[in-house]
Amino acid sequence: MWSERLLVATEQKESGVPHALGLASNGLMLIWQGEQDLALAQFKESQTILQELNNDQYKALITLGNGIALINKGNDSEAKPMLQQSQELFREQNQTFFYILSLVHLGNVELGLGNLENARALHEEAQNKARPINEHWLLSFALNNLGEVARVQGQYELARKYYEECNSLLTDTGDNGDKARFVHNLGYIAQHEEEFEIAETQFRTSLKMFRQLGNRRGMAECMAGLAGLKARQGQVKWGAVMLSAAENVLMSSGGAWWPADRVEVERSQEMIRSALSEEDHSTAQKKGRAMTLEQALAFASES
């Protein structure tokens, strides 16, 4: 990726600020690829360089990056003050785009902490601020997370409305990463509406997209979706193995489920445990945990 090329360039290494920015940029890419611990290490090194240079210009961006990585690890309480700090710094700097981005991530934190109304209010504020400046990606990000709140609350038709508007906003942008997310989310909506064939198509399409992009988190989320879906259709042992493999893929990179997916995964876990004997469940979990990413992907294609 371009940020890695920036890091290895000798002339950039000799210049502290560009190297620090290269580290921070690489950290953001690592978050997206599902490498949270590596991302945090990059942010820490970047922050150290800038502190040594007594440079606070990019503090807000690095603080935001730290907060996002911590959300991805499931450390919402630790992420919250960082995101609040970055939000305030971006407000002071009149950085509207990043101020709104901080709002959305604060909403994610509140959802993770179980504060659904706070989450909804933050995402609505972000939506209202993104529309006038015609930032389609930022608006879609806020709307997607409003959909996540609605999904957690069981308001599936409302969630579908948000996800579909997101997809229409990004149709011509080439943003395959976010479009893969919407396809995945709509898979859960189809599952809840008992449109199982549509749900499977959505999960498998999203899995293929995330695989092409190298996004491990996304792949794990889609495998978990398939696991719960197939278990509900009677393939409980297969679902138990697949779910365990998906969890292993996610945790191997230091990640944790996003709040809305965590609700879905917990439901699937409960359903699978109640349908299998303790011995069968334990055997399935061990089999899934032993799989590499490639083995898990191959197993996902077998059903």
Image: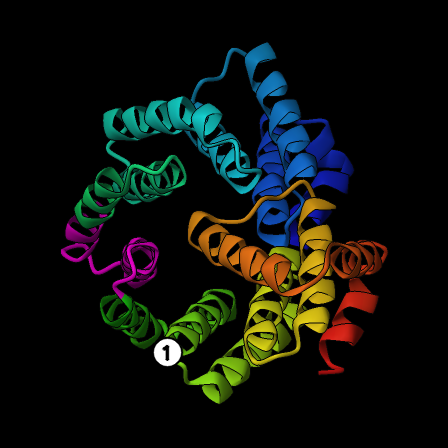
Say which of 161 and 266 sits in front. 266
Left or right relative to 78: residue 5? right
Quarter assignment of residue 142: bottom left
Helix, strand or loop for disc 1: loop
Image point 29% across, 72% down: which residue? 160
Number of labels in the image equals 1
Residue 186 location in percent, x, y?
A: 40, 73
Quadrant in which the N terminus is drawn: bottom right
Bounds of the magenta segment: 126-155
* Residue ID at (60%, 72%): 231
- Residue furthest to the front: 277
Q: Eyeballing the image, is 298 above or below 77?
A: below
Q: Is residue 266 above or below residue 234?
A: above
Reply yes or no: does residue 147 show up in magenta: yes
| Residue lying at 32% horizontally and 24% vertically, measured from the top left | 89
Q: Is residue 292 above or below residue 179?
A: above
The C terminus: image quadrant: bottom right
Side of 269 relative to 150 (left or right): right
Report the coloring of the rendering. Answer: rainbow
Q: Was residue 279 drawn as part of the magenta stretch in this picture?
A: no
Q: Quadrant of residue 83?
A: top left
Q: Main secondary structure of the magenta part?
A: helix
Viewer-proximal residue, 300 or 132? 300
Where is residue 67 drawn, in percent x and y? Answer: 47, 32
Three-letter residue code for mark 1 = Thr
Mark 1 surroundings within 10 Å by alpha-carbon count, few (fewer than 14), some (14 through 19), many (20 or more): few
- Residue holding disc 1: 171
Residue appearing at x 64%, y 35% in the figure: 23
